[in-house]
Image (tube, helix red, strand yellow):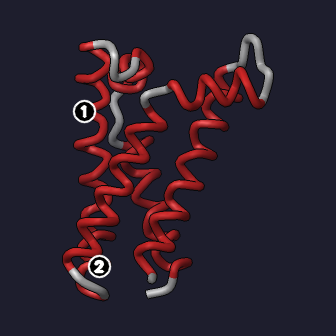
Amino acid sequence: MSWSEALLAFLVSHAVGDVLLQTDWQAQMKLRGLGDPVGRRALAGHLATYMLAFLPALVWIGAETSAVRAVAVGVLVAITHLLVDDGRLVSEWLSKVKRAADPTTALSIAVDQSFHAVCLLGAALVAAI
């Protein structure tokens, strides 16, 4: 498999997991972050359903390469998704890099999704090695 094939599979999986399967409650409460019990519960629930969306792609990676690689890529996708969705990285980027004192929801979502895309590209490159 090529990195571009893996990336396409990951982007579709991401859309399913991050948009179609994520509940409104998860989307609202995960912003509280890992430091808050409700935020942790929302993040854990979202991550569980998010990773379900990746199962077909991960099975494919396992069949094309190895089960170890598929598990490693799955862990990479899960950890990076959790770190982005915790919100602190996005908030810091908006504040320090974008210098957005009061960022719009659209800008926050754009930065969040940009980080996800970069992370998925990295995971696709690892999958294709």
Along the line of sight, the residue nearer the viewer: 40 or 92: 92
Q: Position of residue 21 (x, y in %)?
A: 33, 41
Asked which quadrant contains residue 112, the reply is: top right
Along the line of sight, the residue nearer the viewer: 92 or 53: 92
Residue at horizontal 33%, vertical 29%? 23
Q: How far apart are marks 2 and 1 (CA)?
A: 25 Å
* Residue found at the very far right of the displayed protein: 99
User: Where is 98 relative to 101, above or below?
Assistant: below
Q: What residue type is labelled 2?
A: Trp
Along the line of sight, the residue nearer the viewer: 49 or 83: 83
Residue at horizontal 61%, vertical 32%? 109
Callout 1: few (<14), some (14-19), or many (20+) C-alpha neighbours within 10 Å?
some
Asked which quadrant contains residue 34, the reply is: top left
Quadrant assignment for the N terminus? bottom left
Along the line of sight, the residue nearer the viewer: 63 or 96: 96
User: Where is 49 relative to 10, above or below?
Assistant: above
Q: What residue type is labelled 1?
A: Ala
Callout 2: few (<14), some (14-19), or many (20+) C-alpha neighbours within 10 Å?
some
Asked which quadrant contains residue 86, the reply is: top left
Q: Where is residue 102 in the image (x, y as percent from the top left)?
A: 73, 11
Q: Which one is earlier in the sequence, the residue at label 2 or at label 1?
A: 1
Query: Mark 1 sits on what residue?
Result: 44
User: Where is 15 relative to 58, above or below?
Assistant: above
Mark 2, mark 1: which one is toward the viewer? 1
Query: Mark 2 sits on what residue?
Result: 60
Mark 2, secondary structure of its residue: helix
